[in-house]
Amino acid sequence: MSKDLNAHLFGPGPKRILALDGGGIRGILTLQMLRKIEALVRERSGNPDAVLADYFDLIGGTSTGAIIAAALALGWPVDRVDAIYRELGNDIFKSSMFRKGLLRPKFSAKAIREGLEREFGEICLGGPELKTGLAVVVKRLDTGSPWVIHNCPKGTYFNQREGTGSIANKDFLLREVVRASAAAPTYFEPERIRVSADLEGAFVDGGVSPHNNPALQLLMLAALKRHGLDWPTGSDKLLIVSLGTGTKTAALDQEKVMMMPAAELGVRGLTSLMDDAAALNELLLQWMSDSPTAREIDSEIGDLKEDLLGGGNPLLTYLRYNVEFDQDWLKDRLDLDFTADQLDSLAQMDKPENMDQLIQIGKAATALIDPAHFDAKFDIA
């Protein structure tokens, strides 16, 4: 039986969070894994029409993950989201000889704005169309602050603050918030969102923050009192399922690095910083959780299965599913063969021509999702 938004956010029982990484067109890979989870929910609940919004009490995402999260929170099945995503991907990432990402963004924002308006229309963040909790990570670049915009009615900024003239979060258009989260610098222009009667903010991709993988931020949103949810923690009370869009370790020749122009060093440095933030995100969550999917973070600290933050009880159950664009990993884990050049291309976030191969990898990656990872204590009736 479907729950309403209030039951998801404030009802009794264990809570379930779905966290979706950014990654451009690689989000099509994530959707294949989501289809497997949706099928599991349908099987466990005995409802062939169950959707992920029935199971998860909070769905959050960054960038491309925000697009998927918003659609899922509206109660749409994965097949519908997948079809929309393929259409959007082909429309959004159309290159132009006049756009190289240096003096102007690489892609026009017209296609993504029109696509999101077509799908989300005039739905607001506080609208009844949202069937479960939704959180979208954006970066307000004019103030240098990451924002997590969500639909919890008890949140500090959900309603207009008296005497401030601010725009309530509940009144933000869903399409504008999602478009802001996907406004990757150099790829798309920033999104203007009116934040008060006389002020607009300039927002960019939430990946330009420590939260391209939003899982840790969603844990804070769920557990910190000032955010309004104040969910209880514990491995039997809180589940986070975190899905990636694929990762690739940058192995560079030392001499090549030393000879790089300053601009390339800057880009490589930013990318490396985002990778480091993602690794720290996973490290912290594995450290404080019961995690049957825990991976080796590095050769020094391992997978942290013998460590627990604070030495007490786990704060949550944590499941993380992702793939590596690495020849050995794909062969060993998924029995897939790709050339090094193919993997370099697949790791790019703006190549819709890669969708078929990304779908192939995503479907193979469903083998990583063991139904036994999803403890029966988190099942829905």
Image: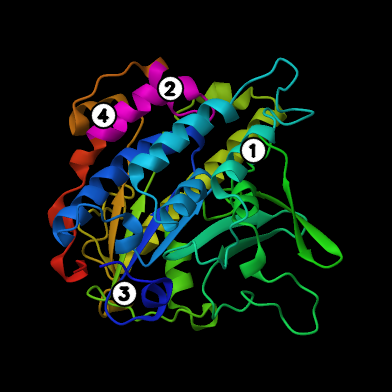
Foreground mark, 2 or 4? Answer: 2
Residue receiving disc 1: 114
In this figure, which residue is indicated by the disc labeled 2?
A: 354
Question: What amino acid type should be assigned to the residue bearing mark 4?
Answer: Leu
Residue that numbered label 3 is attached to: 315
Contact (CB < 8 A) between labels 1 and 2? no
Quadrant where the C terminus sits is: bottom left
Residue kind at label 2, given as amino acid type: Asn
Which residue does the numbered mark 4 point to in the structure image? 330
Q: SS class of the residue under badge 2? A: helix
Instruction: State left or right for residue 255 relative to residue 133.
Output: right
Give residue 20's mark: none
Distance between the Cα atoms at labels 3 and 2? 38 Å
Q: Earlier in the sequence, mark 3 or mark 2?
A: 3
Q: Is residue 286 visible?
A: no
Q: Residues within 10 Å of mark 4 (few under 14, many from 20)?
A: some
Q: CA distance from mark 4 to mark 1?
A: 36 Å
Q: Residue at x 71, y 22 (%)?
A: 100
Towards the viewer: 95 or 276 = 95
